[in-house]
Amino acid sequence: MDRRKFLKQSSLASSLFFVPSFVRAFEEVASSKLGYKRLVIIQLSGGNDGLNTVIPYRNDVYYKARPTLGIPQKDIIKLNDEVGLNSSLKPLKRLYDKGYLSIINNVGYPNPIRSHFRSMDIWQTATDANTYSQSGWIGRYLDHYGKQPHSAIEVDESLSLAMKGEQFNAIATQDAKAFYNLSKDPYFKNIHKHKNDAHLSEHNLGYLYKSMIAAESSAKYIFETSKTVTSKKEYPNNKFGKQMKTTAQFINSRIETKVFYTSLGGFDTHVNQLNTQKRLLSNYAESVEAFVEDLKDNNTFKDTLILTFSEFGRRVKQNASIGTDHGTANNVFIIGENLKKQGLYNTMASLSDLDDNGDLKFEIDFRTIYATVLDKWLEVDNKKVLNTSFNPLDFI
Amino acid sequence: MKTKHIQHLYRRIGFGILPATLNKLSKKSEKAIINEMFESSKKFTPLEIDISELTAIYSSIIKKESTLDSETRKKLQQLGRKKQIEFNIAWVDRLTNTPEILREKMTLFWANHFVCEDSTISYIKNFNNTLRKHALGDFRAFVNAVSKEASMTKYLNTKQNKKQKPNENFARELMELFTLGVGYYSEEDIKESAKAFTGYSHNLKGDFVFRKARHDDGEKTFFGKTGNFSGEDIIDIILEQKQCAKYICGKIYRYFVNDLIDENHVNEMANVFYKDYNIENVMRYMLTSGWFYNDQNIGSKIKSPIEFIVGLKTIVPTDFKNPKQLLYIQKLLGQILLNPPNVAGWKGGKSWIDSNTIVLRLKLPSLLLNNAYISKEKLGEVDEYAQAKKEAFKKKYGKRFKTVANWEYFNTQFKNVAISDFQKHVLACEVSESAKAYLQSLEKVSKKEYCVQLMSLPEYQMC
């Protein structure tokens, strides 16, 4: 459905009246009984050091490359005889034990870019390293499959490029009430009382009016739907914890939103990395565990998939300041109840076969993960969103 | 010249026009007005902020009096961030108060054409002033200057482009985004032209340096020509393509005339531009064309966030007590100057508008200028609680935006404007039927309250 059509339908909600009742009945079944699948994206900004997150603790090369930064075997949470997790990821280990976690190693893209800005841009727009796009992958998903502005919500105050489409953008809100308050001045309601005004069809002005009407209705919908639920779960008391709590509240209110976008920053650990990363990972893992439990308590976890990524990993060798410099491939976490491949999806990257910069050579293109999520979870045609066809993987 | 056309002209080549200036100009001919406009933009005033503290650190490193240890690095980063904010604010101020209106608007246009970003303030300041310097000049010299800017050689990796290991980033974007547009060159053209730009680099001060040892001075075949081409030669060959003139004129047209292209008009412009690639000439052609003032081009564009902010400040001068809030608003509206999304720049037009930005745009004038209050007093009624409401709003939203609006200036400027004429000074397009009916049912409490009402309409988003 294109934007014009859906706006027409959403602003003329009364047109539902004319839909034969059996069609409506079918739609209700479709949305409530068959499961309304949602995707939650967590962006770790700054380039998380994947090698100190998922650790090849039996690999001598790892300890040789990181004499003071390598994590001692005794501190590692072991997943198997080769691989373990950073000690701050205990909550994640519990999810792993329940079969809720799939770790995809060595994810990247050809001709890697080591600039935060540009590499994040590539991850968000899902383009080749030498192509620049003005739309993001979730935005293009909305272009083709979005029904309302709130079909995708970024739990923040403004939108990332990932959430902007060619014709259609998601909504950013971290405070549904504040957003609603901003939109509900009666002045705005009164200026568009006549819905069939000729100006609604005008090129740009009509678009402004329609956007205003759609925004008012989405702001009201998000606020009124989400306020029916309050979360009793304890989350870490910080920005990311709050983001995850708000996201859980949205999901548990059964809001009709397909994609949520959240982020946690600070991973650019060039200097004295150990403690900084530990603190960040622990915040991540505790928030995610609380989030999963919150959803489970409300029976929404089974229809939720969580994807965690960072714009790049870091160099294998530590630097002179007990930190790491920008690298390439990294791990991606998939969290959900019905994973096809639980635990480690693939083996870890080779630490001896590196590129000219001393960085990992990627194995899995991140866009095949997007394609998998689009095809198998959101059940749409990934080619329409990614513009190129990628073969899906089989973690779900 | 008709007042309606003067207003249109000033909304496009600037950020609007105040009644007194409009009155003065309306007695003049179109030719005189446009001549004066170009005349006042002849001058070039670089945008400066004080970065002496930073340069002192750099020069002591150059002189080897100190080293770039992690503490110095951190200090440089912090200072740099602070100065970026300062430069952003200085730029917005410049846009609000400048006699070189057209040059500044063109600078803003080119900043979203030759898109660049750099955390090194001295480099990006130079880059920004290069845009300003060439804004109305010779496009060939402009492209060459941009290709040699420190910020650009960093941003698109020309610095890393070496004979032994070419980096094609700049060559690709030079053609795709800066001169020809997608589809008018081959992958082979990119490979070959990248060789010509090998060796482009800069020193610590930010001056262009040509590193001969890294330059590939072998033969290159580009657009069917073969030779030992330099970067300048490549730009010459690109400009020989008529497509380059067409591409640039299309962009100028979308920015200054209408985001729906009229092929005939763009072709007319391209014919003028292709002759000498003189930017002033093609701008003059466009601004004196009858079609520029066609009704369908008036009030038909959606303001960019910067046009929205500066336009608002033009009518009611507004000071931000905490300048960072000005950046915060830019962020929320989706356009932070000096901080583009990527080298493709901001898409513009409709893409400025989404649920978040439309809600904020409608509410922002009242938030910034009137304690979030939009008068809804019915005809003949008095809202006794208006003042109380404002106080309450002030408490609620005051923390978010601390601004001082200079309504006295507004009142002086609009003193002689009849309330019945007021609307056309604030809005660029006709008001929709339902908004018109609603406004007519409301009391015109004062010009101030009426101004806030008009600025709170979707129509105010148009220019």
Image (cartoon, rainbow, N blue to C red):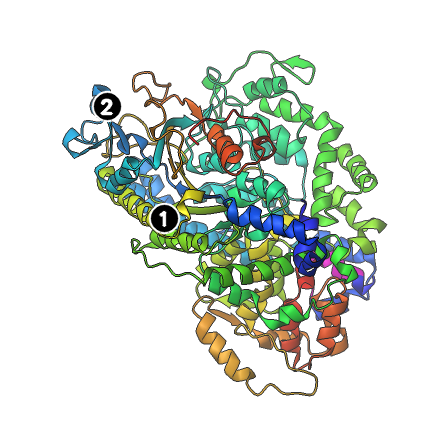
- Subunit under mark 2: A
The residue carrying mark 2 is A82
User: What's the residue type where badge 2 is placed?
Assistant: Glu
Q: Main secondary structure of the magenta part?
A: helix
In the rendered view, does B27 fall on the left or right side of A231? right
From the viewer's perspective, is residue B239 above or below residue B293? above
Range shown magenta = B5-17
Residue B297: percent from left, percent from top? 78, 53
Q: Specify the subunit that label 1 lies on.
A: A
Determine which quarter of the picture holds residue A316. Answer: top left
The verdict on a common chain for dots 2 and 1 is yes
Q: Is residue B417 visible?
A: no
Which mark is drawn over residue A119? none
Quarter of the image where the N terminus of chain B is located: bottom right
Is residue B16 covered in magenta? yes
In the rendered structure, does residue A67 fall within the stretch colored magenta? no
Taking the image as shown, residue A316 lies to the left or right of residue B250, namely left
Residue type beneath disc 1: Lys
Toward the viewer: A80 or B87? A80
Q: Secondary structure at mark 2?
A: loop
For mark 1, what is the residue?
A296
Mark 2, other Cα within 10 Å: few <14 / some 14–19 / many ≥20: few
